[in-house]
Amino acid sequence: MTTVEIEAWLREDDPVRLEELWAWADRVRREHVGDEVHLRGLVEISNYCVRSCAYCGLRAGNRRLTRYRMTAEEVLACARQAVAYGYGTVVLQSGEDYGMTRDWLADLIRRIKAETTLAVTLSLGERPEADLAAWREAGADRYLLRFETSDRALYDRLHPPRPGQARSDRLALLDRLRELGYEVGSGVMIGIPGQTYASLARDVALFRELDLDMVGVGPWIAHPQTPLGGKSRVTGRESRVATEQARAWLPGLPQWEQVPNTEEMTYKVIALTRIVCPEANIPSTTALATVNQASGRELALARGANVVMPNLTPPRYQALYEIYPGKACLAETAEAGHRRLLEQIRRLGRTVGKGSGSRRKRASVFLRDT
């Protein structure tokens, strides 16, 4: 599939054709990763962040947010809960928090690996190479770092550099993570103001070129305490971006070129990602469950996804990890969410994955552009 073909699918709105896309993605998923749904327990260990990203509620400039860092014992308790639920992986996520030191986290990783059989995934932002190497040596298995958009001009508007530092190069950092021996995950937001159909098609093509082990995508949901906040709303099954916000963010962008941050567009990207990255682990994200709490998670699993990351963060911290408002996981306890997730998997005729659920690599053929 070329980038021209990817873009054509992104623009497709014929329900019959889209049903063909969903079936195609589901068939590829079944053939390459099987019917198992791998469960990864998510623990949001800190909401401190030194960055000032334009879309994220954790941004350093959000003075209304109460900050927290979990203790090592609190994180270990969540890891033990993941084991009790039969999960194969624990995902440690935070803002880019330098109060969480290299040595503290390395010791925590060693304790998790010593006390459990869990794989450890990290999602901690752009940390120095010495930190990443130390955590890999301590036993971390995977690292997740979204490149957010392949459009460099848009990326620079979304992710201003820290004072006194050069602008970041997440693609180079993804390469270095692989060199260090991590399984590497990345992804993008769908419908961020300024995102065009052409750039999103390039994003999907780039997933394949990077040979990612995991790809996570979800709809952009505005946070009111950000430069992009207050212009988007979540209503029922769909989250819509205001076209005037997109034009203000990227002057000169034609209205018809702005990608909508809708549930359906997110399913299109999940399905296309599965087709061009058949072996990758692709999660049904919390953001999708937020815009459609009734069936968003199940629809994603039926359209190419094979991973879910149930939230194990203690309730007193979950509401404070506010990348965007109204997260679906806040509506229920971890135990209730676990039971509901198992029922959803059963209804789909799928099974819960065993073990760490690492990517199954086969011989690959790279996507060619036109």
Image (cartoon, helix red, strand yellow):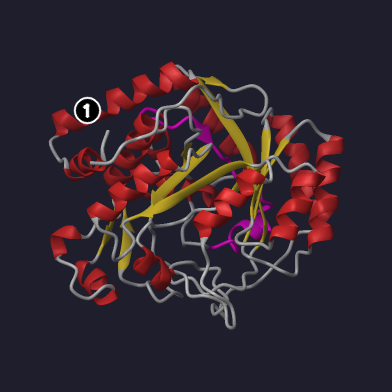
Residue 66 on the magenta segment: no
Tell me residue 209's x, y (percent). 42, 41
**Can the viewer see residue 339 in this picture?**
yes
Residue 305 drawn in magenta: yes
User: Is 17 placed left or right of 249 in the picture?
Assistant: left
Residue under numbered circle 1: 19
Q: Position of residue 44 (x, y in %)?
A: 65, 54
Q: Is residue 174 above or below residue 96?
A: above
Going by the image, does 241 lie left or right of 221?
left
What residue is shown at x 33% (from left), y 34% (from top)?
271
Q: How many marks?
A: 1
- Magenta region: 302-322
Task: Classify the position of the N terminus by image quarter.
Answer: top left
Query: Residue 327 appears at what percent x and percent y?
Result: 49, 54
Instruction: Work out which quarter of the rendered image holds the C terminus and state it.
Output: top left
Which quadrant of the structure image shows residue 349? top left
Inspect this view and state whether residue 237 appears. no
Kindly report the secondary structure that dominates the magenta region of the rendered protein: loop
Residue 157 versus residue 346 in the image, above or below: below
Pick whichever, 316 or 84, lies toward us.
84
Residue 348 image position (x, y, % from top left): 42, 21
> Measured along the vertical axis of the image, is residue 230 above or below residue 128?
below
- Assess disc 1: are there few (<14), some (14-19) or many (≥20) residues with their C-alpha within 10 Å of its C-alpha: few
Q: Viewer-proximal residue, 62 or 130? A: 130
Q: What residue is rendered at 35% in x and 72% in y? A: 230
Q: Residue at x 57, y 38 (%)?
A: 337
Element type where label 1 sits in the image: helix
Residue at position x 28%, y 28% from top?
22
To which quarter of the image does residue 196 belong?
bottom left
Q: Amino acid at mark 1?
A: Glu
Is residue 216 toward the left or the right of residue 262 in the image?
right
